[in-house]
Amino acid sequence: DTAVSQTPKYLVTQMGNDKSIKCEQNLGHDTMYWYKQDSKKFLKIMFSYNNKELIINETVPNRFSPKSPDKAHLNLHINSLELGDSAVYFCASSQDSGTGGRINEKLFFGSGTQLSVL
Amino acid sequence: SQQGEEDPQALSIQEGENATMNCSYKTSINNLQWYRQNSGRGLVHLILIRSNEREKHSGRLRVTLDTSKKSSSLLITASRAADTASYFCATDRDSWGKLQFGAGTQVVVTP
């Protein structure tokens, strides 16, 4: 069974459209993330949720809205897609270290969603 | 801002050789992690080294950490074609979940 699964794997869409990417983890982890990887492979965190609560919200346009219906799921909805949104989006999860969550433990990544905005 | 930066950006070696790549960072850390990314796939965790550790081994991987120089190295010994991938270091600061990744070192191992 895939530990962190995200769908779809590929997403090709027109500018101005709204799209969603779904993520699910079956590891029982408390924390989930969305990362964006650009064409130069630079990976940047976008959002982080712990037990359905938003704990990290980086400087991301408000067209991007994460939603966590439960701690096993973290979806990403993007409104009014722009050309610059083209990238690979990765979902990840990690287990609370048990020390108040202040120390980052290892991340488990999904296989990515390649978004192409035309 | 980018916390970890890998060096070199690209590395090409032959099977059986060792591959060494370095990571430098700017601020104090709790731990440093190395990840591997095969083409078209997600990142896979390799090793986590804590700030009070100096060296760690896992199979053919050896990681060192020098907090005084704010740098780490990843050594892959006796490389194989299957080691062809991009390797990333990731550092944390004091924020929960805020791992900072560099742009990676692309390693190509030829048979």
Image (cartoon, coloured by chain):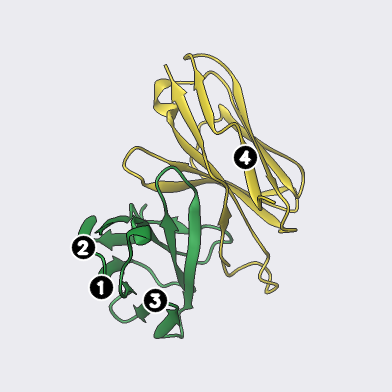
Mark yes or no: residue B3 visible: no
Sequence-wise, which precedes: disc 2 or disc 3?
Answer: 2
Mark 4 — residue?
A6
Sequence-wise, which precedes: disc 1 or disc 3?
Answer: 1
Q: Quadrant of residue A77?
A: top right
> Comparing marks 1 and 4, which lies closer to the viewer?
1
Colour displayed for chain B in the image of the structure: green
Marks counted in the figure total 4
**Amino acid on which the number 1 mark rests in the picture:** Asn
Compute the Cα span from label 2 to label 3. 16 Å
**Which residue is at a point 52% across and 29% down the rendered structure image?**
A10
| Marks 2, 3 in one chain | yes
Colour displayed for chain A in the image of the structure: yellow
Q: Mark 1 near mark 2, Cβ–Cβ under 8 Å?
A: yes
Compute the Cα span from label 1 to label 2. 8 Å
Q: Is residue B11 above or below residue A112?
A: below
**Amino acid on which the number 3 mark rests in the picture:** Arg
Mark 3 — residue?
B60
In the image, farthest residue toward the front:
B111
Given residues B10 and A89, the one toward you in this image is B10
**Which residue is at a point 51% across and 14% down the rendered structure image?**
A16
Sequence-wise, which precedes: disc 1 or disc 2?
Answer: 2
Q: Residue A30: which disc?
A: none
Mark 2 — residue?
B13
Mark 1 — residue?
B18
Chain bearing mark 4: A
Compute the Cα span from label 4 to label 3. 31 Å
